[in-house]
Image (tube, helix red, strand yellow):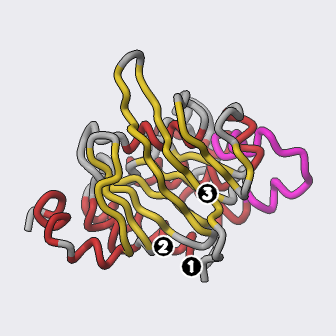
């Protein structure tokens, strides 16, 4: 069961691109053991929020607390070291490198002796990556590249996994596979996940809780299944 204190607690977060503010005081929280979904249309601020959480996008106001600590000014690599890993939109794998080299890059900050064990664990999750581990990553299909991107993030041993549009560009059958993987990471591996998705139905179907973001502001929040049945969400994002 999720804990009572948030693992991630974001309050009044603001971020801008030059003079244009993209986030207008966003507040969200994620508890350990949850999948929390953030859904919304193009340009709503979903990716900007994730980039702000991972430290790639500067914030101009508000606070990001992780395990009770204010990390709003930490560098991206310091946030990875603290336990936050992002799977970026579009996967962004290193296509010429071998699959295994891509995975090992996810552990670049680690100095412990258990990296090989975690590599075996990723291969257990995604057997196709093991079968082709010496091959260039660019030869993988879109769905397999998404598995690789998730596996690479898992190699940092994250306490919080940020997933940015994992279904983008995938065929429907592969979308189902990706969301099965996300659910398994929570249920079998205990990974806490903040999931940003345009596919509102798929995301809210597996989420413990969800938020709807519109033009840089949180418009609605609630448990995943509750949002799925909300008439406003159904009309705006589910087409029903």
Disc 3 vs disc 1: which is toward the camera?
A: 3
Q: What segment is highlighted magenta in the picture?
A: 102-119
- Vertical order, 129 against 102 (above or below): below
The residue to which callout 2 is attached is 183
The residue to which callout 3 is attached is 8
Q: CA distance from mark 2 to mark 1?
A: 6 Å
Residue furthest toward the bottom? 1
Q: Quadrant of the N terminus?
A: bottom right
Q: Report if residue 57 is visible in the image.
A: no
Q: Position of residue 216 (x, y in %)?
A: 33, 41
Disc 2 vs disc 3: which is toward the camera?
A: 3
Q: Position of residue 15 (x, y in %)?
A: 46, 31
Q: Residue at x 80, y 62 (%)?
A: 117
The residue to which callout 1 is attached is 187
- Which element is circle 3 on? strand
Q: Which residue is at the front of the view, 106 or 128? A: 106
Q: Position of residue 124 (x, y in %)?
A: 64, 68
The reply to whether discs 2 and 1 touch (Cβ–Cβ < 8 Å) is yes
Residue 23 painted magenta: no
Residue 106 painted magenta: yes
- Which element is circle 2 on? helix
Q: Which residue is at the front of the view, 142 or 195? A: 195
The reply to whether discs 2 and 3 touch (Cβ–Cβ < 8 Å) is no
Disc 2 crowd, CA 10 A, few/some/many (<14, 14-19, 20+): some
Dot placed on the residue nearer the N-terminal end, 3 or 1 = 3
* Count of picture labels: 3
Dot placed on the residue nearer the N-terminal end, 2 or 3 = 3
Q: In the displayed structure, does residue 176 sit left or right of residue 146? A: left
Q: In the displayed structure, does residue 238 sit left or right of residue 13? A: left
Disc 1 crowd, CA 10 A, few/some/many (<14, 14-19, 20+): some
């Amino acid at each position: 069961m999720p804990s009572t204190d948030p693992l991630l607690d974001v309050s009044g977060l603001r971020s801008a691109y030059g003079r244009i503010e993209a986030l207008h005081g966003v507040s969200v929280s994620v508890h350990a053991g949850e999948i929390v979904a953030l859904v919304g249309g193009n340009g709503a601020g979903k990716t900007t929020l994730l980039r702000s959480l991972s430290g790639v996008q500067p914030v101009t106001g508000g606070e990001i607390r992780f395990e009770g600590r204010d990390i709003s000014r930490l560098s991206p690599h310091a946030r990875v070291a603290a336990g936050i890993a992002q799977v970026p939109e579009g996967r962004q794998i290193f296509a010429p490198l071998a699959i295994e080299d891509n995975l090992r890059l996810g552990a670049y900050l680690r100095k412990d002796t258990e990296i090989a064990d975690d590599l075996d664990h990723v291969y257990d999750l995604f057997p196709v990556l093991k079968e082709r581990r010496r091959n260039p990553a660019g030869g993988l299909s879109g769905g397999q590249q998404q598995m690789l991107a998730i596996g690479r993030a898992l190699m940092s041993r994250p306490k919080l996994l940020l997933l940015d549009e994992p279904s983008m560009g995938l065929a429907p059958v592969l979308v189902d596979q990706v969301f099965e993987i996300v659910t398994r990471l929570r249920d079998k591996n205990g990974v806490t996940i903040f999931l940003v998705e345009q596919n509102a139905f798929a995301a809210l179907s597996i989420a413990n809780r969800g938020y709807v973001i519109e033009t840089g502001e949180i418009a609605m929040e609630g448990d995943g299944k509750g949002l799925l049945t909300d008439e406003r969400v159904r009309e705006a994002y589910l087409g029903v």
